[in-house]
Image: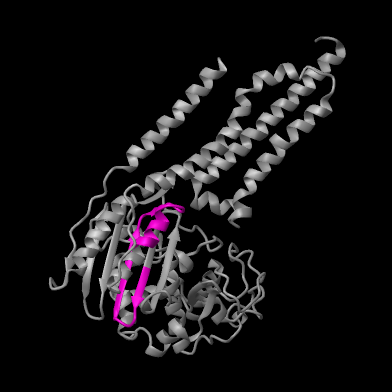
């Protein structure tokens, strides 16, 4: 096949795919009816307009929000595919605050001592004599970010905040050991039922019965419906206590009211204060927030402090906020994971609502921001893929040049392009983002597919060239060429 025609066809196909992706992503998101407790204040109609616009611009398939004070729901809105505030979403790390509540309940019952080593409750825990329960709660145990219950150990300096899901996986194990029942049974009996959280669950079966919304994962700018990756065992990176509770925003509103009402019979006011402020640690020197027990406190540059925790899984994001000086709280959930674009916009959107409640101006999401940002990312991935594909297009030119008796010089040319370069591409994510490839596969699958396919193509092309070198060198020696 003519090389120029091949390249023209390849580029045309890429352009067509990009055009389809852009058109797909320009489809509008629909806004649903909101309910408010009062018509006196226009702030909630402004929030609704802001969310309608941002949801459409961020290409979020479904979003739900609930804003409450101590006694009532002030605002609830559902956008895109979400039809009801009773529709459950998977929460991601917002689940950690629920787990922290369960631990504090057992502390109040004197069944757990925060200052005790975890070996007191988990005798077989690795490094258990060196890790305190409190250190699991605020991520100062020294455990690694990507460790699980089957491979955890202290690798970081203790007392320094290093966010790790395994901390809360271990807390789940402690809850089960101390209570003598499963995590799901304990949380249902001691938290969900007393607060009448009828659309919150700690198992996949219950989540599905409650009407768990479909999840989406982004591939090259296109949200694709994806099966939820619920953890099949306790040895997964993200376990239920660390990130796989499901809840509706209506239930999250009730849950947040528990905090606003000083525990509401679930916890004491002292325990809540401990979770928020009692044992907080600085997250990073240049980031003005501190992490407590399942909650972060953010101050500057805000006009007043805000408590917050966000959540992310492979098919969705969520965030909860408490404005303690105003006795307000809000929960926002979405059913898509788009790590570099939509997730950032969800963060902007959530903080935008908070800023409006603080009488400030929210950050807007531009109408073309989604497409523009994805085109840049897709362009980078396209370049990487082209680097891998182009050697195949020129392979027919390589064959005549391989008709030589000397294999070694040809091999020296093959190694940089077809061995070192594929290795470098595979190491891009681990080196620059400090993230294992198995995490990238789950949370940025389009990038993983691109780098894996590109590396494989370069390596395969190198093998073909090596075989050609050997064959033609052998023929040259026998005089067949």
Which region is colored magenta? 320-349
Residue 298 is covered by the magenta coloring: no
Asked if one can make out residue 219 in the rendered structure from this viewpoint, the answer is: no
**Residue 183 appears left or right of 139:** left
Quadrant showing the C terminus: top right
Tell me which residue sits at (42%, 86%) in the image. Answer: 273
Above or below — where is 405 with respect to 39? above
Quadrant showing the N terminus: top right
Residue 200 falls in image quadrant: bottom left
Relative image position of residue 260 (x, y in whole percent): 31, 82
Q: Name the residue nearer the viewer: 306 or 178.
A: 306
Residue 331 is covered by the magenta coloring: yes
**Residue 455 appears left or right of 286:** right
**Residue 278 appears left or right of 371:** right
Tell me which residue sits at (32%, 83%) in the image. Answer: 325
Q: Name the residue nearer the viewer: 21 or 246.
A: 21
Above or below — where is 3 with respect to 156? above
Number of marks in picture:
0
Q: Name the residue nearer the viewer: 119 or 275.
A: 275
Above or below — where is 426 with respect to 261? above
The figure's colour scheme reads one colour
Relative image position of residue 480 (x, y in whole percent): 82, 9
Relative image position of residue 182 (x, y in whole percent): 46, 72
Asked if one can make out residue 457 in the rendered structure from this viewpoint, the answer is: yes
Q: Name the residue nearer the viewer: 203 or 27.
A: 27
């Amino acid at each position: 096949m003519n090389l120029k025609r091949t390249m023209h066809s390849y580029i045309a196909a890429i352009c067509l795919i990009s055009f389809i992706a852009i058109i797909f992503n320009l489809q509008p998101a629909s806004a649903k009816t909101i309910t408010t407790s009062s018509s006196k204040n226009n702030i909630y109609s402004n929030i609704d307009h802001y969310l309608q616009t941002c949801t459409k611009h961020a290409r979020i398939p479904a979003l739900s929000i609930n804003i409450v004070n101590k006694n009532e729901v002030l605002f609830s809105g559902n956008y895109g595919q979400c039809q009801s505030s009773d529709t459950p979403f998977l929460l991601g790390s917002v689940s950690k605050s629920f787990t922290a509540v369960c631990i504090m309940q057992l502390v109040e019952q004197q069944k757990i001592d925060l200052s005790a080593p975890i070996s007191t409750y988990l005798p077989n825990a690795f490094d258990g004599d060196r890790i305190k329960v409190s250190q699991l709660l605020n991520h100062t145990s020294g455990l690694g970010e990507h460790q699980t219950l089957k491979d955890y150990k202290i690798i970081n300096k203790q007392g320094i905040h290093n966010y790790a899901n395994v901390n809360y996986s271990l807390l789940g194990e402690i809850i089960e050991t101390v209570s003598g029942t499963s995590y799901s049974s304990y949380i249902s009996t001691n938290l969900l039922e007393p607060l009448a959280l009828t659309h919150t669950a700690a198992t996949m079966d219950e989540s599905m019965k409650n009407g768990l919304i479909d999840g989406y994962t982004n591939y090259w700018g296109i949200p694709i419906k994806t099966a939820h990756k619920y953890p099949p065992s306790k040895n997964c990176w993200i376990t239920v206590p660390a990130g796989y509770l499901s809840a509706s925003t209506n239930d999250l509103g009730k849950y947040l009211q528990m905090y606003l009402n000083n525990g509401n019979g679930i916890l004491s006011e002292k325990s809540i204060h401990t979770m928020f402020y009692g044992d907080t640690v600085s997250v990073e020197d240049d980031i003005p927030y501190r992490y407590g027990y399942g909650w972060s406190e953010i101050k500057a540059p805000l006009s007043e402090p805000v408590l917050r925790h966000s959540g992310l899984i492979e098919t969705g994001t969520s965030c909860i906020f408490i404005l303690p000086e105003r006795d307000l709280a809000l929960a926002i959930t979405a059913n898509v994971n788009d790590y570099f674009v939509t997730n950032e916009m969800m963060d902007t959107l959530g903080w935008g609502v908070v800023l409006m409640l603080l009488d400030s101006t929210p950050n807007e999401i531009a109408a073309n921001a989604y497409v523009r940002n994805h085109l840049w990312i897709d362009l980078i991935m396209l370049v990487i893929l082209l680097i891998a594909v182009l050697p195949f297009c020129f392979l027919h030119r390589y064959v005549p040049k391989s008709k030589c008796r000397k294999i070694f010089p040809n091999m020296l040319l093959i190694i940089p392009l077809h061995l070192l370069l594929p290795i470098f591409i595979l190491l891009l994510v681990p080196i620059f983002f400090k993230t294992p490839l198995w995490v990238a596969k789950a949370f940025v699958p389009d990038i993983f597919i691109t780098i894996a396919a590109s590396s494989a193509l370069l390596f395969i092309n190198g093998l073909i060239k090596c075989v050609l070198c050997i064959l033609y060198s052998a023929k040259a020696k026998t005089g067949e060429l």
